[in-house]
Image (spheres, rainbow, N blue to C red):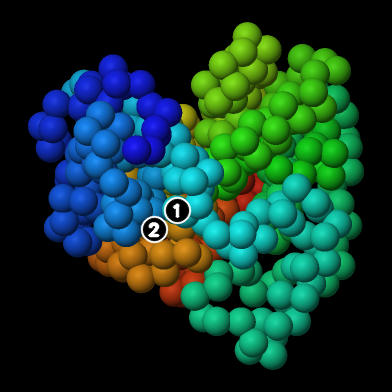
């Protein structure tokens, strides 16, 4: 018998209605019940309540969940699927059914920024001489050496994180410039807070995620500055520290966290008569911005004054397949999910795709999608002389 450490009441909130099925990318790809939220919850119930053994098929069912949480808004019963799958994976890792030690090696680098940057330089060289497999998504233009972001004031923190700061620092620079245009002095969190723990939590390394979250809270407890995040995945993790740790301190911390688009949307009145860029932009909603933070409309609000045309994808925010490290560990499913997203993108005439999550950007860039972070688009517009 394996105790998944899940409450029976939480499991029984699922009434097996199936309204989640159309919103689950792995079910839409495979058509298999075990690859759906409903099927996975049923497996959890059997293991937790009926002593069902954990078979390879059960492990595969849990391991192939992208954790996009698209099922949650569709669920009429309010099933907390995200916490159920996170706890299940945590138990399976603890019991050595999932994530063997060699697969945990990449997570070691995420909390060690100097090592991460060193390892990134090695990857850049390996990519240039074609030693990396094609499925390994990383930007084409990572500089070998890159200066860190400098503090410009202490009105807000800009959370810079781990992989994004090592691989996509230019996006942070754009975010910082936009905030400065709006009159805010920015303190980048930099190396003192190298990781939010989101990737650890999604992989089942829950204790590591808790340890990281406690360090983050301590490091940013010296004052009550707002914490702005330009990565949808990091923002979702920071906003859920209260749930992860279950403390008042963590809840207070999470109340200070804002997706950067939420913050900018509240201060757009600073801008005077913006001149729009003559481009059409498809908005791709990252799962953790749409389904977890429920802040995806802010992206449209902040882009609208700066671009000629905004285009929505009619897919209810279906996952692109990136899923943090999912595309690395489940490349076939990740590619199939991406194919659906890319088909929708290519069916629309556009100049660029806007996505507010670094993982989505990398995953879609890999197949030739011209994609930018919304802050990069706004930064470009501001650099062309929009008056403030």
Mark number, residue 83: none
Question: Can residue 141 be seen at all in this image of the molecule?
Answer: yes
> Percent from the top left, x then y, of residue 196?
66, 38
> Percent from the top left, x then y, of residue 344?
27, 61
Task: Please give left or right for residue 239 compared with residue 78 in the image.
Answer: right
User: Which picture quadrant has residue 161?
Assistant: top right
Q: Residue furthest left?
A: 17
> Percent from the top left, x then y, of residue 63?
39, 53
- What residue sits right under mark 1 in the picture? 97
What element does badge 1 sit on? loop
Task: Please give left or right for residue 175 compared with residue 377 in the image.
Answer: right
Quick one: 350 or 369, which is closer to the camera? 369
User: Which picture quadrant has residue 115?
Assistant: bottom right
Callout 2: 10 Å neighbours few (<14), some, many (20+)?
Answer: many
Mark positioned earlier in the residue sequence (1 or 2): 1
**Quadrant in the picture for the N terminus:** top left
Task: Please give left or right for residue 292 compared with residue 248 in the image.
Answer: left
Q: Residue at image x 27%, y 57%?
A: 57
Mark number, residue 321: 2
């Amino acid at each position: 018998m394996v105790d998944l450490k899940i409450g029976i009441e939480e499991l029984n909130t699922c009434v097996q209605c199936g309204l989640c099925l159309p919103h689950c990318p792995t079910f839409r790809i495979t058509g298999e019940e075990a690859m759906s939220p409903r099927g996975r919850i049923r497996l959890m119930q059997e293991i937790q309540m009926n002593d069902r053994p954990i078979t390879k098929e059960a492990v595969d069912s849990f391991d192939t969940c992208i954790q996009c949480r698209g099922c949650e808004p569709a669920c009429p019963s309010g099933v907390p699927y995200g916490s159920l799958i996170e706890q299940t994976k945590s138990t399976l890792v603890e019991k050595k059914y999932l994530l063997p030690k060699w697969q945990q090696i990449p997570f070691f680098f995420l909390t060690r920024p100097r090592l991460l940057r060193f390892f990134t330089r090695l990857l850049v060289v390996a990519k240039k001489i074609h030693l990396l497999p094609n499925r390994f998504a990383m930007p084409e233009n990572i500089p070998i050496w890159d200066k860190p972001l400098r503090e410009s004031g202490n009105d807000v923190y800009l959370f810079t994180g781990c992989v994004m700061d090592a691989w996509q620092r230019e996006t942070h620079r754009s975010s910082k410039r936009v905030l400065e245009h709006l009159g805010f002095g920015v303190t980048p969190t930099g190396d003192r807070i190298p990781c939010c723990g989101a990737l650890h939590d999604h992989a089942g390394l829950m204790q590591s995620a808790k340890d990281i979250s406690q360090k983050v809270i301590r490091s940013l407890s010296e004052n009550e500055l707002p914490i702005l995040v330009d990565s949808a995945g990091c923002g979702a993790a920071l906003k859920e520290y209260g749930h992860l740790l279950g403390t008042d301190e963590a809840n207070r911390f999470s109340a200070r966290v804002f997706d950067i688009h939420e913050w900018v949307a509240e201060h757009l009145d600073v801008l005077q008569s913006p001149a729009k860029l003559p481009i059409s932009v498809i908005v791709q909603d990252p799962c953790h911005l749409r389904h977890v933070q429920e802040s995806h409309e802010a992206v449209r609000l902040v882009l609208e004054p700066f671009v000629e045309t905004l285009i929505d994808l009619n897919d209810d925010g279906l996952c692109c397949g990136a899923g943090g490290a999912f595309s690395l560990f489940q490349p076939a499913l990740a590619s199939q999910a991406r194919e659906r997203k890319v088909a929708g993108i290519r069916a629309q005439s556009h100049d660029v795709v806007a996505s507010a999550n670094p993982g989505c950007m990398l995953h879609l860039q890999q197949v030739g999608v011209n994609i930018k972070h919304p802050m990069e688009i706004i930064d470009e517009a501001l650099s062309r002389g929009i008056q403030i």
